[in-house]
Image (cartoon, helix red, strand yellow):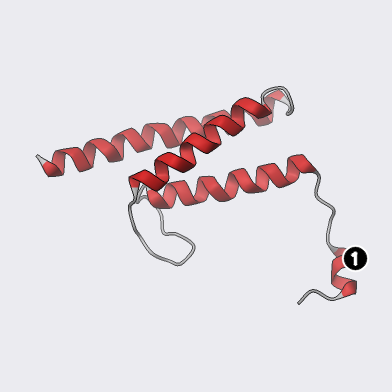
Amino acid sequence: MITIEEEKEMPKLSMQDLIILFFNTIAERCWARLGLTKDEYGEMRQDLGEARLGIDVLDSLVKVLNTNTDQELHRELEGIVANLKLNYVNQYNKTKEVRQ
């Protein structure tokens, strides 16, 4: 439980800060669901359906943020989504090869 003193010390986050925090959290989970990193529980588990859902959400979010963030931040977010998409395709193709 957070005390009143601790609450006063916590920085106030803007809406953009919260959205970026959300973006980074979902991106980390996407990497884990691609089977490329451990998740927050320390497990390696691939679930391409979950990865795809997260990537699609991030892609939509980047489009919305296009006019609401500075160009440098927007390019960085686009780059993250592009890397996730590329790695999704690579992982999908690997699972497809295993099935054949």
Quarter residue 52 falls in: top left
From what the image shows, is residue 69 above or below residue 99? above
Q: Give the amino acid type for the residue marked by disc 1 in the picture.
A: Lys
x, y percentage for residue 79? 53, 30
Left or right: 46 with respect to 51?
left
Q: Using the image as rendered, state which of residue 4 and residue 44 is in the foreground.
A: 4
Residue 100 visible to an observer of this rendering: yes
Q: Quadrant of the C terminus?
A: top left
Q: Which residue is mark 1?
A: 8
| Left or right relative to 44: residue 61 | right
- The crowding category of the residue bearing disc 1, from other C-alpha atoms within 10 Å (few below 14, some 14 to 19, many at least 20), is few
Q: Secondary structure at mark 1?
A: helix
Classify 38 as above or below 66. Answer: below
What residue appears at the point 23 percent right and 35 percent down from the top-left corner? 93
Q: Position of residue 40 (x, y in %)?
A: 49, 62
Q: Residue at x 79, y 74 (%)?
A: 2
